[in-house]
Amino acid sequence: MARPTCAIDDTSGCLNNTATSTFTTTTSPADADGSGNSLNATDLTGTAGWQSGKTVTIDGATITLPEFGTGAYDNMLASGQTVTLPDSGVVNTGAAVVFLAFATGAPVTNATGTITYAKNNCLDPNGVPSDQSYDLSAVPDWLSGPSSAASITLVHENHSDNTQTSPKSGPKVYAISVPLTCPGSVISSVSLPQLTNGVQADRPALHILGLGVRPTTATGSGSSARHWVGTWASVQDTGKVQSSDGSTAAVDSQTLRIPAHVSIGTDSGSGVRVHLSNAMGATPVTFDAASVALQDTTAAGATAAAAPATLTFDGSPSVTIPAGGDATSDPVTLTVEQQATVLVSLQVRGMAPAIPGHSVARTPVWVSDHADRTSDTDATHYTQTTYTGLPYLSGIDVTTSTSNPAGSLVLYGDQSVNGGTASADGRHHLSDAITDALADDPHGDASVRYGVLNAGADSNSLLPQITSSTSPFGVLNPLDRDVLTQGNVRTVLVSTGATDLLNCTGNAYTCATEVEDGLASLDIRLSGYSTDDSQLSINQQPVTQNSDITVYLATIAPFTAAHPGTATQEAAREEVNTYLLDNYPGQIIDFAAAVSTDGNATSSTVKAADLSDGNPSAAYYADLAGRYVDDIDAGALIYPPN
């Protein structure tokens, strides 16, 4: 019997379950889990702004949504359906396929499917077409799954007896990305996993609302061909940016002016684009205007060096981003030198009682009076806020040439990357320190050779679930959103595990093993992705031999007086570092040795010169950056991003 087939932008032919309902006295029939429970459609379409039948951009992929709450089928229970990608009208080439999904009954593991490439695309080294298997290795349950990984968390759950509850954990929908083994090749279809075409209570079922392809970083053609590369990034890790007095920051029809200290500069094409995010927001946000400018190097602050360039989004000066979504501006022409500070201005429509973004930014933010000040050059109408976080802005890309594109290095980790105790000028995170170290490297040419992106978040556990899959597997947030959506990622430096050790209450062996396994899993997941700028070809057709993303693992620095560990936790830290040094030769950057008193990975204290009131200082991050550059120069690592 033939499996159902549908198009990626019209999945009606593949829908086979009703998982959303409209709550009234006669709730529309729906059953997501075999017990008559369902998502509340109003939470999706009203509160979150996910419009029925329209598109939403999640983690860089544009996904067409079904109609919600009508009583008709509104999702694909994964049962082997084939989703085709038309030749035009949709994104059919890219770096990853993103599934918008959730499980019911229990988490779904090792759900496998196939990605089929178009004729003469994705050839093996012998010139034979090579389809790709994939594995959605861990799709969380809609109720018990982690909120930290969800694209959206809803408030209500509807029930077949016309009642409604508000579960503490909230029904959730997740974005899971699958790396393409042949980025840039044309995809003809995606076959969904074959699990079940019906729901039963307490039996795992995989619901897919839609899927999309995340584009590669290539842009233009012929002599105007360029590659986008990330030059600055900020992790989205809070739905409520705070003010210094502990209150929730808010904005009311005002313009935010946000500085970003970039790493790499533009090439001769002088192209810049800006990424905005509402990933952690609970409601939609509309920006009626946006702009980008260089900061005046003399006046500094909110003063621009020249009239800001207006940003547009698909040609429109305004953009609405639903909860969980993101948006990328159209390119503008702006010459940006390496290590410059760029000012991004956002006019927010109406009252936003809570502002999502990055929680601990150590960066000043300015806000205007109740007017659109995005085009202002001077800072007359701006006042510095007391925000401790950074709202809405998630990334900035610049263009580099196709013939010699620069890649980016993503720093993924905890407070060791974020720089939450460094100077509050937005220029002393680890990414800034590495950028400065590259420019000052005596073995270099004073240039910053690649983008350096900060994907650090204070006090977060970033270690994923363990997987034994041998197929390219799905990656959940925050890893996908914070790392793999960044512009032209070639290398990832992972520096995390300290928070996990400080939270562990077991014995040293157990604590160490959990962190070791998590770091190993991160290495596997990240290296499963390919770069999208170095394809080989046969007869001008892409083949499957792209370079995998290079992964470096950092040893865990000694605990500090501000965050002291127990003797057991310290023993576990030393065990983890020994494990890393013994098992990952050529991949290790010894951050612990860079800042420890004795200059080795098992020394238990941080040298006094790197501390200020018991916390890491700017000197601490400079020492970490120096260690990275020294290892690159010494050739101890596999290869730098360029």
Image (spheres, helix red, strand yellow):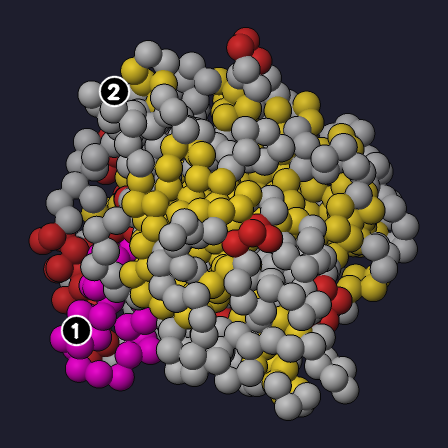
Judging by the rendered image, the residue that carries numbered circle 2 is: 127
User: Which portion, as a residue range, is magenta?
Assistant: 496-523
Judging by the rendered image, the residue that carries numbered circle 1 is: 571
Give the amino acid type for the residue marked by disc 1 in the picture: Ala
Up-down: is 573 above or below 385? below
Alpha-carbon neighbours of circle 2 within 10 Å: few (<14), some, or many (≥20)?
some
* Residue at image coords 57%, 71%: 19
Question: Quick check: 438 left or right of 158?
Answer: left
Res 406 seen here: yes
| Local SS, label 1 | helix
Front position in the image: 380 or 530: 530
Q: CA distance from mark 1 to mark 2?
A: 52 Å
Mark 1 or 2, nearer chain start: 2
Q: Position of residue 208 (x, y in %)?
A: 50, 59
Up-down: is 197 above or below 367? below
Q: Is residue 434 magenta?
A: no
Q: Nearer the viewer, mark 1 or mark 2?
A: 2
Up-down: is 620 above or below 241? above
Res 420 seen here: no
Q: Position of residue 7 (x, y in %)?
A: 55, 43
